[in-house]
Image (cartoon, rainbow, N blue to C red):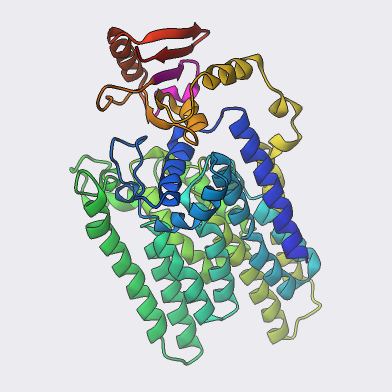
Amino acid sequence: MLAWGLAAGFAALYTCVGVNRHRRGLTKAYDLGIFEQAVRAYADGRAPIVPLKAPGYNLLGDHFHPLLALLAPAYRAFPSPLTLVVAQAVLMALAVVPLTRWAHQVAGPRAALLVGCATGASWGIVRAAADDFHEIAFAVPLLAFAATALGRRRPLAAALWSLPLLLVKEDLGLTVAAVGLLIAHQARQDRRTPLPGLALAVTGVAATALTLLVVLPAFNPNGGFDYWQQLDAGGGRAPLWTLPLRLGWPPIKWLLLFLLAATTGFLGLRSPLLLLCAPTLAWRLLSANPHYWGVSYHYSAVLMPIAFAALVDAVRRARAGDHASGHVGEAATPRRVRRALAVTALVTVVTLPLYPLHEVVMPEAWRTSPRLTETRAMLRLIPDGATVAASNRLAAQLTGRAEVTLVCQEPAGPGPDWVVVDLRDPSVQSPCATAATARMLAVYQSRGYHRLIDQDGLLLLEHP
């Protein structure tokens, strides 16, 4: 009951934050709009063509996430971007369940309550739950169940929970391989055959290679994988010996590693389960994209269930060591465990105000500003089913009822019925550069689009 109660509570909190951020117009085309267009296509029985990426763009050529199709029935029943927001909230909250149960088994109800609350309020999961929608929402509970099964020495369950990760995102095949290697290691310790674990590891590596080299290029309009260049910080000139240096520089990468270790109370570093973080950390730290290096965005969500599983496993090992050495009741090891749990609690408390979960109790987050009222009135002028070229945040408000592209894209055919832009949107520079937006607005006006609204940075143009 404790585990499911905490999960329900955090699902409600994530939903409140996510829905309210969408109500306030803070969600974006990149990424809620993109994923809604994909799920909407699945719900209609079509391939996931996403005009927000480019005309005729199949999203399976960007990242490999066919598991998104599982959301199609819910979206067909409730065709709204909020369906994705709520689904993400529920999926991420489910990670609390196996970790809380295992902590209860290992160290009792107080430790279970702490681990469950720290997992649900962890900086990686909270940031992701409030950040539009992403396919890794499926990975968070799968990793929680897989890592818990590994810690409990249930290799078959660990393998079965990890295999669906192959359909969540292309890089997670390497995490599946890491699960297989740990299964093989445990089998050798237990004097069993490591072959099943090694087979899972090979499957994970092979699936990753197949996805990156065959599947993604087959769907991609450029015939390749668009993110290879992000692993090349030197423009093709960086020698291989510089790769280890890139793992630790610039220093913002140290913050990521430190905060991850602190989340486990530093005791989790003693658990081999933490090695499941290695594939994700490797591609993030080696990447030339600075967004991957720090503790912002949604990229750390998949690390959180692994980190807390490592913490619980380390507590289990410490308590088992006490029993084996006959020192149960001595203060040394219990102090170490209590200190680790205290550090985990402290990290949770300190980071909580820095991430969006605190918006639930902020009155200003629930107010409707005059600017928001003006924006809603402008968007109501656009009829359902229209074709629209929009700026980043406005696009996410329209994808559920219109065919939306980004304003900076060259229009296909005669052009959209409507053009709508918020020039005060701080996200308007990405994915559309300000200059590109200005250029396309000039193009539309040169084609005779009527300017219906031009007030305080809000601009609405109608096709002649």
Rendering quarter of residue 373 = top right
- Quarter in which the C terminus is drawn: top left
Which residues, given as a range, are shown in magenta?
Answer: 418-431
Nearest to the observer: residue 205 or residue 28:
28
Q: Where is residue 48 in the image (x, y as percent from the top left)?
A: 36, 48
Nearest to the observer: residue 453 or residue 257:
453
How many labels, in total?
0
Nearest to the observer: residue 272 or residue 424:
424
Identify which residue is drawn at 46% across, 8% down: 452
Nearest to the observer: residue 43 or residue 395:
43
Q: Where is residue 126 in the image (x, y as percent from the top left)?
A: 61, 46
Q: Is residue 293 visible?
A: no
Identify which residue is drawn at 36% across, 50% down: 46
Name above or below for residue 372 compared with residue 59.
above
Q: Where is residue 164 in the image (x, y as percent from the top left)?
A: 45, 66
Name above or below for residue 428 compared with residue 302.
above
